[in-house]
Amino acid sequence: MRHLNYSHLLYFWTVAREGSIARAAEVLHLTPQTISGQLKLLESAVGSPLFQRVGRGLVVTDTGRMVRQYADEIFSLGAELAQRLRSDEPGTPAALNVGIVNSIPKLVAYRILEPALHMEPAVRIACSEGELETLLGDLALHRLDLVLSDRPVPTGLNVRAYNHKLGESGVAFFAEKSRARAYAKRFPASLDGAGVLMPMSNTPLRRGLDDWLDTHSVVPRIVAEFDDSALLKAFGEAGAGVFPAPAAIAGAIERMYRAQVIGEASGVTETFFAISPERKLKHPAVIRVTRTARAELFRTETP
């Protein structure tokens, strides 16, 4: 093979990461037929199959695994080059593209990212929200520089990403100011039968809270469940029920949502991670926000 067709390589790389031609077609905004045809041309040029079908998905062959390793490096370098060129343009702020898992409290996300707003030269932050698996796909395709998550990269997920633990926060319960004193007197027994707003059952926080309530023989009345933490707090502000949130931002929650802490769920914590495409952080803004979060927000030592 005298010359490498980088478009063909991109199609192969995306299929390898997505696990199927159909999902790769959605990511690349192309038809499955186009990608399939281009893969055949690449395989012909390489002289060996790059995939084998397993069930409904595709798995790389030994040759495909080797090609993918080079593709990882090629596209990683390409993304770094594009970032560097954008950053060096006169008058153009460096970009920080961040994915935020939708279960992360918005105030926590803001507090983590706030230091990047005050950097010199200026940094332009672009935030997108979604499910962790979707955001990790965008991270793998270098559409994101960083993912903020309340859980690490799932075990067995075929994506090149590294967890950087930022810290932990205890969890407090909040109530509308007019009702807070009554709930606080007998907390946590006061939650028995009380209307409570909770995160969705598939989140680490919800599982921890359910175990804590069980331990204290408390059975609240679940008024509503949310996968969006800001919406949960908005319902809480309106008096729809007692709600949990990170104790690390208790002061901000009390000010913004006109609520008061009624007690802490001892032993329940939320853990926050910065997930990056490289083991050693390189992006200046990512380094700044992770260091500041550890030192000031979560007050943990830098590992």
Image: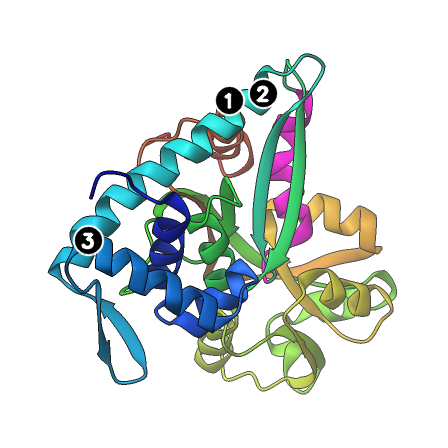
Q: Which residues make up the magenta segment?
A: 103-118
Q: Is-magenta flag for residue 259?
A: no
Farthest front residue in view:
2
Is residue 277 among the parts visible in the rendering?
yes
Q: Is-magenta flag for residue 109?
A: yes
Residue identifier under label 1: 84
Q: Position of residue 144 (x, y in %)?
A: 52, 44
Magenta stretch: dominant SS? helix
Q: Position of residue 99 (x, y in %)?
A: 57, 49
Ranked by sequence position, the earlier of labels 2 and 3 is 3
What's the amino acid at mark 2?
Ser
C-beta proximity under 8 Å, tags 2 and 3: no
205, above or below 73, in the image: below
What's the amino acid at mark 1?
Arg
Residue identifier under label 3: 46
Which of the 4 image quadrants contains residue 118? top right
Residue identifier under label 2: 87
Of marks 3 and 1, the one in the foreground: 3
